[in-house]
């Protein structure tokens, strides 16, 4: 029997080991899901909502165990891990309520002698492929809306965070959902491809890297299959010349370094109006130097390890290459002794200046605790640099001028525009990416459109 081992970034030991599902297991799960989905689609929206609210309640009640397991699986400081359950609750509850609004029959203008309306019907079986970096928050974006819409769900979570899938399904079943309707599978990469290609799967919701998204898309290329792809980012922040540089630094540096920089919508490059550049950089350096890198199970730790040694090596190579090309590193790694004492994946955070867009650190996703900062002369220069990327997930603009932020945001090639904040998903707003950052939409009422199909009723009276 082939097993999957999860090495904890905390100490490198095997934290979880699970057998991988066989092709027979996959086939049985898909057959069971299709069988259960028939009854579930006939269940009223109100009854679905009641069961899903109970599911969310049970997850929230188990927040302490979930937070501890999360820290051990992916390295987030225990002081921060409970926040993921709070985010799961916020999104889960709101998507249930939005489903009650979005999934009702849509009336069209009255026409004498006819009854006409549009109904949104479930697709069938949704395969959710979820990542490790925000494993509850990314999974809830697809799992709860897919179920609320009347679909069955097979959840395959990252091999780094398998307990998230297990706990999620455990609490859903305890809340009363049919075990056949929502199940998890631990699968090899090859068998994920086979699942995507299987005609019993009607939609795939994938969150992960651009390369992973391409592989998933290629696996289903021979089918007329729906995909939701939430992929990578190289998200910019821009500090306008009328902003408070210290307040902007507090927001953007947190956006760059929270979760050790391992966020698809984290801030990875910052552009600052030239007049504010030095005060912004001074504040940014002081904030980063205040972090405590160390054992994430220690409540005093504010910066944990990255997920694995190879990830730390990739980020360090980006930093080294930038410095070799003329960038200046402003953070002395010696201020973070845990990086030397504990070794990779404990990586000292870094701020780089004198950077430009010839450097990978300003163009390719880092997914780690590093950010480059550049001065700019005006809004036009900032917009040109923000758009000089193959990614387009979010962009953050710091200014007290609402109209200015809207004007700039209209010009930026991105899925979400923030003003005076960053790195946050609002469940009432559509979550989308442009360019290599993805395809499709989650959250908001619009998120239900890709998890259902419209069915028109054109009924002529006798």
Image (cartoon, grey):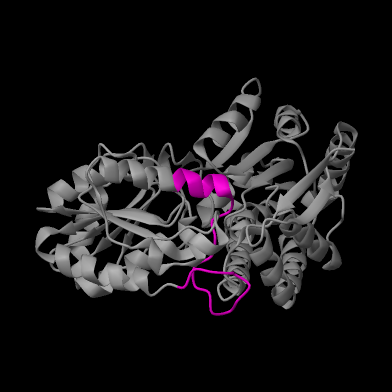
Task: Give the residue drawn at x 54%, y 79%.
Answer: 300
Res 283 quadrant in image: bottom left
Q: The C terminus is located in which quarter?
A: top right
Q: Which residues are magenta?
A: 292-315
Task: Give the residue drawn at x 55%, y 72%.
Answer: 80
Vertical position of residue 327 compared to residue 287: above or below:
above
Q: Residue furthest bottom?
A: 300
Task: Give the residue drawn at x 48%, y 60%.
Answer: 260
Res 201 quadrant in image: top right
Q: Count numbered badges in the picture.
A: 0
- Residue 46 screen position, x and y as percent: 72, 65
Task: Give the residue drawn at x 14%, y 47%.
Answer: 381
Residue 352 visible in rendering:
yes
Res 251 quadrant in image: bottom left
Quick one: 356 or 178, which is closer to the camera? 356
Vertical position of residue 239 compared to residue 368: above or below:
below
Left or right: 388 as drawn, with respect to 294: left
- Residue 306 screen position, x and y as percent: 54, 56
Vertical position of residue 250 compared to residue 415: above or below:
below
- Residue 182 screen position, x and y as percent: 80, 52
- Residue 159 screen position, x and y as percent: 70, 47
Q: The N terminus is located in which quarter?
A: top right
Verify whether residue 447 appears in magenta. Answer: no
Residue 115 visible in rendering:
no
Left or right: 287 as drawn, with respect to 174: left
Vertical position of residue 109 compared to residue 424: above or below:
above
What predominant SS class does the magenta segment belong to? loop
Verify whether residue 300 appears in magenta. Answer: yes
Left or right: 409 as drawn, with respect to 169: left
């Amino acid at each position: 029997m082939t097993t999957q081992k999860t090495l904890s970034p905390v100490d490198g030991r095997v934290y979880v080991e699970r057998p991988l599902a066989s092709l027979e297991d996959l086939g049985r799960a898909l057959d069971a899901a299709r069988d259960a989905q028939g009854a579930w689609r006939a269940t009223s929206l109100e009854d679905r909502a009641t069961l899903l609210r109970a599911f969310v309640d049970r997850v929230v009640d188990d927040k302490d165990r979930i937070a501890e397991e999360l820290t051990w699986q992916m390295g987030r400081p225990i002081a921060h891990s409970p926040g993921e359950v709070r985010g799961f609750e916020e999104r889960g509850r709101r998507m249930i309520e939005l489903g009650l609004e979005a999934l009702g029959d849509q009336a069209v203008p009255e026409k004498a002698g006819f009854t006409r309306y549009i109904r949104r019907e479930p697709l069938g079986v949704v395969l959710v492929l979820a990542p490790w970096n925000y494993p509850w928050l990314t999974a809830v974006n697809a799992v709860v809306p897919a179920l609320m819409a009347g679909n069955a769900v097979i959840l395959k979570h990252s091999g780094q965070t398998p307990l998230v899938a297990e706990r999620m399904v455990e609490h859903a079943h305890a809340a009363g959902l049919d075990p056949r309707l929502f199940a998890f599978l631990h699968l090899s990469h090859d068998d994920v491809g086979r699942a995507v290609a299987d005609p019993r799967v009607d939609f795939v919701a994938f969150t992960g890297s651009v390369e992973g998204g391409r592989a998933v898309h290629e696996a289903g290329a021979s089918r007329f299959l729906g995909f939701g792809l939430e992929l990578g980012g190289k998200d910019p922040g821009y500090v306008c010349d009328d902003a408070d540089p210290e307040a902007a630094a507090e927001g953007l540096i947190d956006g760059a370094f929270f979760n050790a920089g391992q966020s698809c919508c984290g801030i990875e490059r910052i552009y600052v109006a030239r007049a504010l550049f030095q005060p912004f950089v001074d504040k940014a350096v002081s904030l980063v130097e205040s972090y405590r890198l160390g054992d994430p199970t220690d409540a005093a730790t504010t910066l944990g390890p990255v997920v694995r040694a190879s990830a730390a090596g990739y980020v360090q190579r980006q930093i080294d290459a930038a410095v070799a090309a003329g960038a200046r590193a402003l953070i002395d790694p010696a201020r973070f002794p845990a990086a030397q004492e504990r070794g990779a994946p404990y990586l000292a955070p870094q701020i780089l200046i004198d950077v430009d867009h010839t450097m990978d650190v300003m163009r390719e996703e880092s997914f780690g605790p590093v950010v480059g900062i550049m001065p700019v002369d005006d809004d036009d220069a900032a917009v040109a640099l923000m758009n000089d990327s193959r990614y387009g997930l979010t962009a953050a603009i710091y200014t007290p001028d609402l109209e200015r932020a809207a004007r700039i945001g209209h010009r930026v090639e991105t899925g979400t525009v923030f003003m005076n904040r960053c790195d946050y998903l609002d469940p009432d707003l559509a979550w989308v990416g442009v360019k290599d950052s993805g395809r499709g939409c989650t959250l908001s009422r619009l998120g239900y459109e890709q998890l259902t199909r419209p069915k028109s009723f054109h009924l002529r009276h006798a």
